[in-house]
Amino acid sequence: MSGAFTQTELGEHFAHCIQVLGGTTTASRRLGIDERAIRRFVNGEKPVSPRLMQDTASALRALIEEASAAEARITTALGT
């Protein structure tokens, strides 16, 4: 996808990001948002704001850093 999201695409992409973050419960903790609110965003009951997407992007970056550190530790431990 390139360019601006439609509201539908934004909601769908947010739902995908929630899955990448590990599901509703984990995303709730990472984003500091109640699980019910996340479900409302995912279901389209509440509009996804640009600020929520920025926070989601930050949470995804933090997950990338954690995963990269874990991968590096495995690689070092295995000597590969």
Image (tube, grey):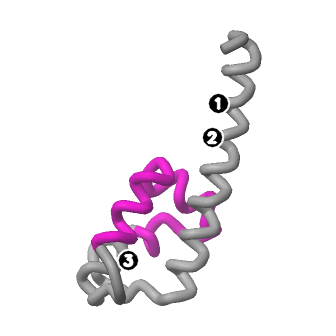
N-term mark: 3 or 2:
3
Residue 17 image offset from top left, x and y in percent? 42, 62
Whole-number angstrom distance, CA of label 1 to CA of label 2: 6 Å
Identify the amino acid type marked 2: Ala
Could you say which quadrant of the image residue 34 lies in? bottom right
Q: Residue at x 29, y 88 (%)?
A: 7
Q: Which residue is mark 3?
A: 41
Q: Residue at x 75, y 19 (%)?
A: 76
Name the residue furthest front: 80
Q: Is residue 23 above or below residue 49?
A: above
Could you say which quadrant of the image residue 77 lies in? top right
Give left or right: position of 69 versus 2: right
Q: Which mark is residue 4?
A: none
- Dots 1 and 2: beta carbons under 8 Å? yes
Name the residue furthest left: 8
Instruction: Give the extent of the magenta segment.
Output: 12-38
Q: Nearer the viewer, residue 72 or 24?
A: 72
Whole-number angstrom distance, CA of label 3 to CA of label 1: 32 Å
- Within-10-Å neighbours for mark 1: few <14, some 14–19, many 20+: few
Camera-near label (3 vs 1) is 1
- On the rendered image, what quadrant is the N terminus found in? bottom left
Q: Is residue 60 above or below residue 80?
A: below
Q: Which mark is residue 71?
A: 1
N-term mark: 3 or 1:
3
Q: Residue at x 53, y 58 (%)?
A: 27
Residue 45 image offset from top left, x and y in percent? 30, 83
Identify the amino acid type marked 1: Glu
